[in-house]
Image (tube, rainbow, N blue to C red):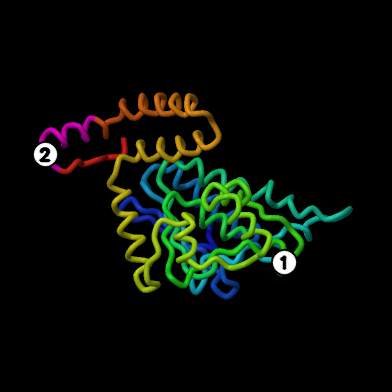
Amino acid sequence: MTYTHILFDEAEGIATITLNRPQVMNALHIGVISEMIDAVDRVRDEGSARVLVLTGAGRAFCSGADLAGGGAGGGAQRSGPPDAGAVLETHFNPLLERLFALPVPFITSVNGAAAGAGCSYALAGDIVIAGKSAYFLQAFVNIGLVPDVGSTWLLPRLAGRARAQAMMMLGERIPAETALDWGMVYKVVDDADLAAATRAVAEKLAKGPTRSYALIRQGIRDCLDVSLSEGLMVERRNQLKAGRSADFIEGVSAFLQKRPAAFTGK
């Protein structure tokens, strides 16, 4: 696929998707999501990237659905009442599921606004790094809709029910420093340092035990809504898989030999 709305780059084990519609603050429509799905599938299937970074060009990470460009999906209906959820089922949600199911770590580098669906994709990162000018916004109530793209599942788990519910019902901007205090992001850095800080984390992950990372991210998701006993079984199964990896053998050997481990992601 030729990309028109995103930039895709891969170097030294780091794949980067950059939303590239700065003139509309990287607003999302079906074309953008289709390209993102294709790029994520490349990372999943080609196997050369060991970490994925998602960011936005210009002054915003992503302003959410492109309402002027039909991003909410309601205008796609040819007859009958509009279905604002149709495009979620066909495009927005499949992308989110793909991001969660990736076999490599996923970093989001948040510059400026992360609103609506853009907020969901930003917070879906395993590691979320935000510039000081970044903010997170659930603005659905301003147009009479409800939060989507996983927001009602993800936000209460990050910020707690009270904060998430107020954020969604009041439609207020949550500045990066507040998001850090609420547990929504990993780190906040000066805007000028955002790219370098993201790169440093990506380089570390690209050199790490990739299979272990995949099991960690899936294990956390599996354990969010289960009992302790069920969570222990998830860990047991994942430890079996991790213990059969080449990286485990290398990690133990490096520890015993008192040298840095040279993980290969296998």
214 shown above or below 142: above
> Mark 1: which amino acid?
Asn
**Residue 250 is a magenta residue:** yes
Left or right of 46 in this view: 156: right
Of 154 and 69, the residue lying toward us:
154
Residue to which mark 2 is pinned = 258
- Residue projecting furthest to the front: 162
Question: How far apart are the two marked residues, 2 and 1, measured between alpha carbons?
Answer: 58 Å
Q: Secondary structure at mark 2?
A: loop
Left or right of 89 in this view: 122: left
Query: Which quarter of the figure has residue 140?
Result: bottom right
Q: Residues within 10 Å of mark 1 (few under 14, many from 20)?
A: few
Report if the CB atoms under discs 2 and 1 are less than 8 Å apart: no
| Residue shown at 52% from the left, 28% from the top | 227
- Residue 168 at x, y = what percent? 65, 58
Left or right of 77 in this view: 63: left
The circle on residue 142 is: 1
- Residue projecting furthest to the right: 80
Which residues are the magenta region?
A: 249-259
> Mark 2: which amino acid?
Lys
**Residue 117 is a magenta residue:** no
Of 243 and 146, the residue lying toward us:
146
Of 201 and 156, the residue lying toward us:
156
| Residue shown at 52% from the left, 62% from the top | 6
